[in-house]
């Protein structure tokens, strides 16, 4: 399990694939680092609804897992968010589950060629 805190920079539209698999991405700009980073995370399946509440400029803390896969002899990594705390720590606003979901190979997007 990994966590990062920052400000929501961008929220993308939900993508649904022919298999019924859905994913939604969002970008968080970290603030704790000397050099802020724009980090793209994704929510899959039932976790997509967590992204519906996000707005650009929101302060968040995101819990996520790393997911790696090989496709046509190239390797890709996804940051799968499974919990989003909205607002600052003193406001509470906890959303999502307390434990990461179990690994499900069906979470891997294989319907299309990945971006390069």
Image: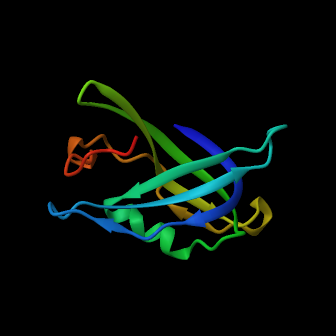
Relative to 52, say whether 80 is above or below.
above
Closer-to-camera residue (16/96): 16
Please give left or right for residue 114 compared with residue 55 in the image. Answer: left
Residue drawn at x 31%, y 32% as measured from the top left: 69
Residue 82: percent from left, percent from top: 46, 53
Residue drawn at x 22%, y 62% as measured from the top left: 17
Residue drawn at x 36%, y 47% as measured from the top left: 101
Count of numbered tags: 0
Residue drawn at x 53%, y 60% as measured from the top left: 26
Please give left or right for residue 10 compared with residue 115 in the image. Answer: right
Relative to 38, say whether 49 is above or below.
below
Please give left or right for residue 9 compared with residue 65 in the image. Answer: right
Residue 116: percent from left, percent from top: 40, 40
Residue 16, located in which quarter of the rendered image?
bottom left
Residue 39: percent from left, percent from top: 60, 47
**Residue projecting furthest to the left:** 19
Relative to 52, say whether 40 is above or below.
above
How did the renderer colour the structure?
A: rainbow
Closer-to-camera residue (113/110): 113
Closer-to-camera residue (73/25): 73
Residue 41: percent from left, percent from top: 51, 51
Residue 47, located in which quarter of the rendered image?
bottom left
**Residue projecting furthest to the top:** 73
**Residue projecting furthest to the right:** 34
């Amino acid at each position: 399990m990994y966590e990062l805190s920052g400000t929501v920079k961008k929220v993308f539209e939900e993508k649904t694939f022919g298999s019924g698999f859905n994913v939604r991405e969002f970008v968080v700009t970290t603030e704790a680092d000397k050099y802020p980073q724009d980090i793209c995370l994704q929510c899959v399946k039932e976790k997509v609804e967590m992204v519906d509440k996000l707005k650009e400029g929101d302060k968040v803390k995101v819990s996520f897992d790393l997911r790696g896969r090989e496709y046509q002899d190239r390797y890709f990594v996804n940051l799968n968010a499974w919990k989003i705390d909205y607002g600052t720590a003193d406001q509470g606003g906890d959303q999502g589950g307390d434990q990461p979901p179990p690994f499900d190979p069906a979470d891997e997007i294989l319907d299309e060629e990945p971006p390069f």
